[in-house]
Image (cartoon, rainbow, N blue to C red):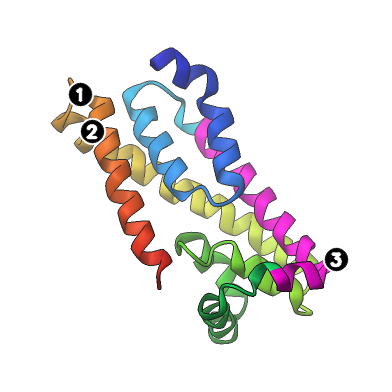
Amino acid sequence: MEDLIRDWGYIALFAYSFGGGFVGLVFAGVLSYAGDLNLYISILVAGTANFLGDQFLFFLARKNKSYAKDMMSKYGRKIALAHIMMRKYGSLVVFIQKYIYGIKTLIPLAMGLTKYSAVKFTIFNVIATMLWGLVVGYASYTAGEYILSAADDFKYIGLGIIAVILLTVSYYFKKI
């Protein structure tokens, strides 16, 4: 199992982080603590994919407004929340959205539909992504000590339990 993680872990992390990445980076942090991945490479891979994903969504909405509106039409409540957050927090919403499951992909789309500066979005997205990668990566690495110390012999079962907990929590946040 460790060889599979070492061989494909960064590729899977990149693919997952392109569309979000929070849970993937948490797993990578814990696996880094376990010695299966490198924390710095994990943060770099997840951060790069996360940045590229947000840029892709922003420019998708900017260049193809009708397609983006069609994509977002089924998320009425979340779009309303995204617009409220954009009005309330302004450019800081680029930082905030990295940590909120369910609207993480909608904020770049919503901002791309507005006249928000693409250069300004890119600059804030770079800074927000670096901060997000460092905070989530190091926090999950530190938590890996506690998670794996409790389940040292069964580290993948422990990770599975954490995955179920994180997915359950994210499912309930998705309903909001």
Residue at image x 56%, y 79%?
A: 76
Residues drawn in magenta:
41-70
Q: Secondary structure at mark 3?
A: helix
Q: Residues within 10 Å of mark 1 (few under 14, many from 20)?
A: few
Q: Residues within 10 Å of mark 2 (few under 14, many from 20)?
A: some
- 90 vs 124: above or below: below
Residue named by callout 2: 158
Q: For the residues labelled 3 and 2, say whether their Cβ atoms are less than 8 Å apart.
A: no
Residue at image x 24%, y 39%?
A: 161
Residue at image x 61%, y 57%?
A: 127
Residue at image x 73%, y 63%?
A: 58
Which numbered marker is on residue 145? none
- 96 vs 52: above or below: below
Residue named by callout 1: 154
- Which secondary structure type mostly characterizes the magenta part of the structure? helix
Q: Position of residue 20 (x, y in %)?
A: 54, 52
Question: Amino acid type of disc 2?
Answer: Gly
